[in-house]
Amino acid sequence: MDSTGLSNKEIVALVDCNNFYVSCERVFNPKLANVPVAVLSNNDGCIISRSNEVKALKIPMGAPGFKHEAFLKKHNGVLLSSNYALYGDMSARVMNVLSMFTPEVEVYSIDEAFLNLSGLLIKDYEEWGRQLKKTVYRWTGIPVSVGISRSKTLAKCANYHAKRVPGFKGALALLDEERIAKALARIDVGDVWGIGRQYEKFLKQNRIENALQL
């Protein structure tokens, strides 16, 4: 154990599919590439998946689709009905590729999986993550981000930065205390896994602003 209480032997990767439902739609309709695309929930209600272009337009997740339809069309964007049969099939394909990299794959959700890397002979974890990313995209067309650390929560933290910072090229390993502390300090407490809006408000009222302080 080190001073954080974490075992030096446990290494966990979180692989997260980027904008998964939108990415699935783009695999079968390449014309949607670089177009603002949002996927709607059952009965075409709320937005449940957004392309980066839609995020840039400041359209929030969970927003009613009809309220933003005209705005999206103005920016040459589209709203799509959900196709869960397609998403389930694409998820299975992604998970099958992940199983090639380690025998221990824990499917966390339709677009996320934890990989146990403990005991694997990996010299450079970030390069390993980038190779995984390239392989998944080559075989499925789905872009993913890879976060690697010494617990599931810290792997989630690493994935958060891998997805948002272009310099990491889609993969980040947080394995030493200094790097972990810096990464946690750069995550708003409201973005921490499991923190709801009311709890976020309470924490910030008590001057807990980021994941490291939490």
Image (spheres, rainbow, N blue to C red):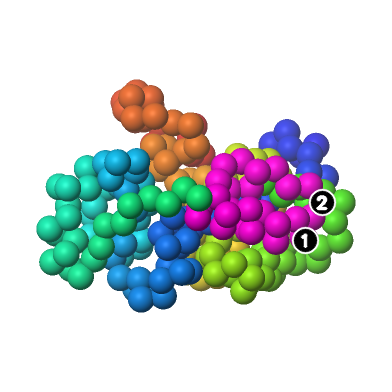
Instruction: Specify the segment rendered in magenta.
Output: 86-113
Q: Residue at x 87, y 51 (%)?
A: 119
Q: Position of residue 35 (x, y in %)?
A: 30, 70
Q: Which type of secondary structure does the marked residue at label 1 adopt? A: loop
| SS state under label 2 | loop
Q: Which mark is residue 26?
A: none
Q: Amino acid at mark 2?
A: Pro
Residue 120's spot in the image, x, y percent? Answer: 85, 56
Question: Where is 143 relative to 6, above or below?
Answer: below
Instruction: Report how far apart the C-alphas of labels 1 and 2 lie in the structure.
Output: 7 Å
Which residue is disc 2 drawn over? 103
Q: Position of residue 28 (x, y in %)?
A: 46, 69
Reply yes or no: does residue 177 show up in magenta. no
| Residue 83 makes an appearance in the image | yes
- 193 lies left or right of 106: left
> Mark 1 is on which residue type?
Met
Total labels: the figure holds: 2
Check the image and report above or below for 122 versus 8.
below
Q: Quadrant of the N terminus?
A: top right
Residue 147 visible in the picture:
no
Q: Is residue 44 left or right of residue 166?
A: left
Query: Which residue is label 1 attached to?
Result: 100
Left or right? Give the position of 187 relative to 150: left
Give me the residue at 39% from left, 29% from top.
196
